[in-house]
Amino acid sequence: MNESVTGSSDSNKDSSANKTRTSQSYFNPFLLLFYDFMLYRFISPYLWGCSSQLLVERYNVLCRNKHLETGVGTGYLLKKCNAPIEKLGLMDLSQACLDKTARRLSHLKPDVWRRNILTPIEGIDQKYQSLSINYVMHCVPGNYTSKGVAFKHLKTLLLDDGVLFGASVIKTDQSNFIAKSFMALLNTLGVFNNTKDTVDDLEAELRRHFKYSHIERRSASVLFIATDCENQYKIHHTEPDSDHFSCFAGCDEGHEPHHS
Ligand SMILES: C[S@@+](CC[C@H](N)C(=O)[O-])C[C@H]1O[C@@H](n2cnc3c(N)ncnc32)[C@H](O)[C@@H]1O
């Protein structure tokens, strides 16, 4: 095997692992104390352009009885929503995030999995009807062409009619000066790794792994849904109370769904 190729991929892996470690170091018990207030009262609505109500509404509409929360943070959105969850899985790389969220949602007796979504996910014998990955991908190193492999790994945990949904932050000219500066700072600190993220690449990765997908942009927040199931597509295509989900990519009237 060509040594320079091997060397370069090893150094890419090292760099990705180092960036993951740096980003993870911010998800510690002390900083998590301020997380909900900072993110959902201030940063998400005013800098990323997405209210917590909109995100909670998506949980209400899209969470199914068997739900897997990936990249759990503090479990804020799950706690706020009124989705009919009976069986809950929590998956994250940060033990601090898992502990905090599991405590907060202890009434649901969650299964807790410490896993890295960038590597194949092993040792989980359950499959879920819905899976959310909210505000996670912008922390993950690489561009979507490389980190999009997370969708492939997560899909193995979805039932055939399952739905994956989430949001991520992507740079946009629509953001104000404070939002742009704050995002640059988070990238410099290594909390975020989204300098190479584009909406087109995100969409391409969802399409690579799912038959139906939908993306909606709210300033710097990009909300997405993906599924392989035509029925799920129809449900959300016609969802009366939620025009946010009314149009899956490639499935608007007169268009054929895209196939992976
Ligand atoms: C910004 S927080 C989002 C938390 C929550 N979903 C929310 O919307 O508030 C990012 C979460 O993703 C987790 N995370 C980041 N990279 C990960 C990875 N490679 N594998 C698994 N979890 C990861 C972090 O530990 C953290 O819990």
Image (cartoon, rainbow, N blue to C red):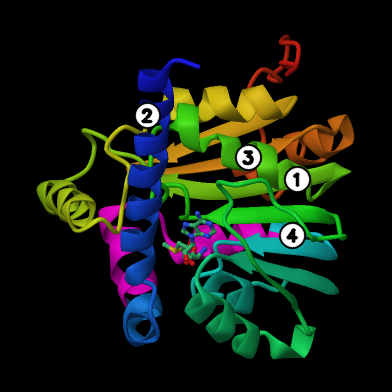
Using the numbered discs, state the Cα–Cα distance from disc 2 to disc 3 in whole angstroms. Answer: 26 Å
Position of residue 123 in the picture relative to residue 60 (left or right): right
**Main secondary structure of the magenta stretch:** helix
Q: Is residue 23 left or right of residue 126?
A: left
Helix or strand or loop: what does disc 4 sit on? Answer: loop
User: Which kind of residue does numbered mark 1 sit on?
Assistant: Val
Measured Cα–Cα span from mark 1 to mark 4 = 8 Å
The magenta stretch is: 38-60
- Residue 64 vs 36, above or below: the answer is above
Task: Select label 2 or label 3 by which is in front.
Answer: 2
- Would residue 67 appear left or right of 33 to someone viewing this image? right
Alpha carbons under labels 4 and 2: distance apart: 43 Å
Neighbours of disc 4 within 10 Å: few (<14), some (14-19), many (20+): many
First in sequence: mark 4 vs mark 3: 4
Name the residue beneath numbered marker 1: 163
Give neighbour class at mark 3: few <14, some 14-19, many 20+ (Cα, 10 Å): some
**Residue type marked 2:** Gly
The image position of residue 114, as x and y in percent, is: 62, 68
Q: How many marks?
A: 4
Where's the C terminus, which quadrant?
top right
